[in-house]
Image: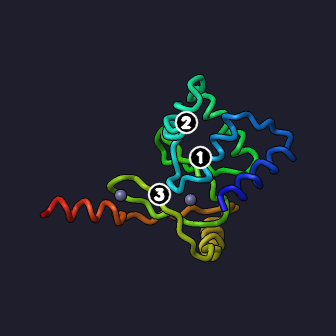
């Protein structure tokens, strides 16, 4: 499944005339196999053993190229740590207040919210982002353990 996705992504890049360097391949592979919406720093840390000469700037540069070609989405949270998501289909996120983990969930797109926002405010609405917050199962477990 991930291998198929990787091949598809590589085909997209090739068609766009983007060179597939070993680092670019590794960043893409890591993103497609990681369900955790990593930061650039986390990607760098995961790959630095494999590519000792790679810098954080290289990771950012590769993420920018992947973003420009529609293969990843950047999720900004108003601080320095953008997270990267290789699931580019419409989906929403539930975020753990304890550990910051982001998990995808699917729900029919709330198009009527966009329509309403447009009517009420006169904005030309382009998209929306919905986030649900709570405590993930692992952190719930950890809390229970602490109480024993
Ligand atoms: Zn958690
Ligand atoms: Zn996501």
N-terminal label among 3 and 1:
1
Q: CA distance from mark 3 to mark 2?
A: 21 Å
The residue at the far left in this view is 148
- SS at mark 3? strand
N-terminal label among 3 and 2:
2
Query: In this figure, which residue is indicated by the disc labeled 2?
Result: 47
In the image, 10 versus 40, the foreground residue is 10
Query: Which coloring applies here?
Result: rainbow
Residue at 86% x, 40% y is 17
Q: Left or right of 101: which side holds 56? A: right
Q: CA distance from mark 1 to mark 2?
A: 8 Å
Q: Which label is found at residue 102?
A: 3
- In contact (CB < 8 Å): disc 1 and disc 2: yes
Residue at 53% x, 64% y is 104
Q: Which label is found at residue 30?
A: 1
- SS at mark 2? helix
In the displayed structure, would residue 35 be above or below residue 23?
below
In the image, 16 versus 132, the foreground residue is 16
Image quarter where the N terminus lies is: bottom right
- In contact (CB < 8 Å): disc 3 and disc 2: no
In the image, 6 versus 87, the foreground residue is 6
Camera-near label (3 vs 1) is 1
Image quarter where the C terminus lies is: bottom left
> Is label 3 within 8 A of ligand 2 (CB to nearest ligand atom)?
yes
């Amino acid at each position: 499944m991930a291998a198929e996705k990787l091949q598809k992504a590589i085909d997209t890049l090739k068609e766009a005339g983007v060179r597939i360097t070993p680092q670019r391949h590794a960043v893409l592979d890591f993103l497609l196999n990681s369900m955790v919406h990593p930061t650039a720093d986390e990607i760098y840390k995961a790959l630095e053993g494999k590519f000792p000469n790679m810098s954080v700037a290289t990771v950012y540069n590769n993420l920018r190229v992947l973003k420009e070609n529609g293969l990843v989405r950047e999720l900004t949270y108003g601080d320095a740590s953008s997270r990267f998501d290789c699931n580019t289909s419409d989906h929403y996120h539930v975020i753990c207040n304890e550990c910051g983990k982001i998990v995808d969930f699917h729900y029919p797109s709330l198009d009527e919210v966009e329509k309403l926002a447009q009517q009420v405010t006169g904005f030309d609405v382009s998209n929306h982002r919905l986030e649900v917050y709570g405590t993930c199962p692992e952190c719930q477990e950890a809390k229970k353990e602490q109480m024993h």
